[in-house]
Structure formats: C-alpha cells, structure tokens
Image: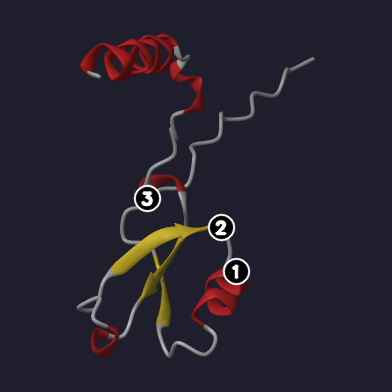
Amino acid sequence: MRKMILGPLALLVAVVGAAPTSFAQTLTPYDYPWCALYPSDMGAGGARSCYYTSFQQCRETMSGIGGTCIRSPYYHEPQRAPVHYKRY
C-alpha cells in the first residue's frame, strides 16, 4: 500500500518543485497607496491590509464591514526622471 502512495506523491513533489517561480506575487504593501483598517470587532484585531490601488477600491471592499481607508504609510511614489532640456 505504501508503494502505491509514494509513487504519485513523488511525482507531485517533482512537478511542484520544477514549477516556474514567475507565478509568485512580487508586489508588496510598499507598491500600493491605500490601506484598509479592519474593525477590531471582526476578530481581525484591527488588521491593516495595504493592497489597494485607489481610495474607491478600498472603500468598496470596506462597504458593509465598517472598516476605514487610509493612505499607506509604506507607499512611496516612484521617482520620475528629471527632464533635461536641450539648449539651442
């Protein structure tokens, strides 16, 4: 019986181990400008989720839950390259 289970299990481990890592999420809370603060009475203990691209997206998620949306303290806008004008 053990041999019958180990064969498929070894195949599963080999396939998962060989899967490309490009599916991993590379964005962090530092990449999003808005956070949701969940109410502490939900059992989340006032948790913060900073994965919102807009205030509207955050508010729609919090609708009916009673949470609050705030600007992310982690987010830093990308630096833009300075514009260099040519003198003629």
Which residue in the structure is indicated by mark 3? Answer: 29
Q: Which mark is residue 57?
A: 1
Taking 34 as reference, is 2 left or right?
left
Give the amino acid type for the residue marked by disc 3 in the picture: Pro
Q: Which mark is residue 53?
A: 2
Query: Given the current orientation, which residue lies at the most extreme front position?
Result: 1
In this rendering, would 77 be left or right of 74? right
Does 16 appear above or below 65? above
Q: For the point 57% across and 30% down, which residue is it?
A: 82
Report x, y in % for residue 42.
29, 85
Q: Is residue 79 above or below residue 38?
A: above
Q: Can you give x and y, in whole percent of width and height, for residue 44 in the image?
A: 25, 76
The correct choice, above or below, for 14 with respect to 1 in the image is above
Residue 6 image-quadrant placement: top left
**Residue at screen point 44% across, 18% down:** 21
Which label's residue is closer to the chain start, 1 or 3? 3
Q: Of the residues shown, which amino acid type is indicated by label 1?
A: Gln
Alpha-carbon neighbours of circle 3 within 10 Å: few (<14), some, or many (≥20)?
A: some
Q: Secondary structure at mark 1?
A: helix
For marks 1 and 3, give the CA distance: 15 Å
Label 1–label 2 contact, CB within 8 A = yes
The residue depicted at 56 percent of the width and 29 percent of the height is: 81
Quarter holding the N terminus is: top left
Q: What kind of residue is marked 2?
A: Thr
